[in-house]
Amino acid sequence: MPTGLPGMSVTKAAEVMQIQNRIIRNFPEVASVFGKAGRANSATDPAPLEMFETVINLKPARRVGVRHDDRTN
């Protein structure tokens, strides 16, 4: 899980996450990217603002040009 510098502002965290998402989105295998900085208002999610969660949805292998043999080795 990527992290930023301690004490990072909300604005800077959003900027860093946008840059990270843009870089990840450039890979041809990636269908979509969704990032979250900080935590929900819940005692079960103790993540600080500096910690990012990123969900990456990949395209099906047949749309990226990966052969079946390449995926199994």
Image: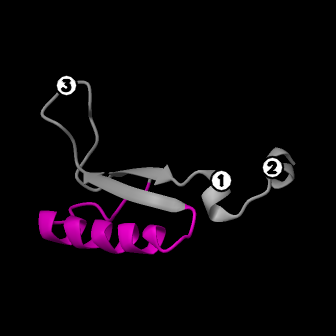
Depth check, front residue: 57 or 52: 57
Q: How is the image coloured?
A: one colour
Looking at the rendered structure, the secondary structure element under dot 1 is helix
The disc placed on residue 1 is none
Q: Residue at x 50, y 61 (%)?
A: 30
Counting residues from the start of the chain, the first of labels 3 and 1 encountered is 3
Q: Quadrant of residue 46?
A: top left
Is residue 5 toward the left or the right of residue 49 in the image? right
**Contact flag, marks 3 and 2 (Cβ < 8 Å):** no
Say which residue label 1 marks: 61
Q: Residue at x 32, y 65 (%)?
A: 5
Looking at the rendered structure, the secondary structure element under dot 2 is helix
**Contact flag, marks 2 and 1 (Cβ < 8 Å):** yes
Say which residue label 2 marks: 68
Looking at the rendered structure, the secondary structure element under dot 3 is loop
Is residue 61 toward the left or the right of residue 13 in the image? right
Depth check, front residue: 6 or 1: 1
Counting residues from the start of the chain, the first of labels 3 and 2 encountered is 3
Give the amino acid at mark 1.
Answer: Ala
Total labels drawn: 3
Q: CA distance from mark 3 to mark 1?
A: 38 Å
Q: Residue at x 34, y 63 (%)?
A: 4
Q: Residue at x 19, y 25 (%)?
A: 43
Residues drawn in magenta: 2-29
Give the amino acid at mark 2.
Answer: His
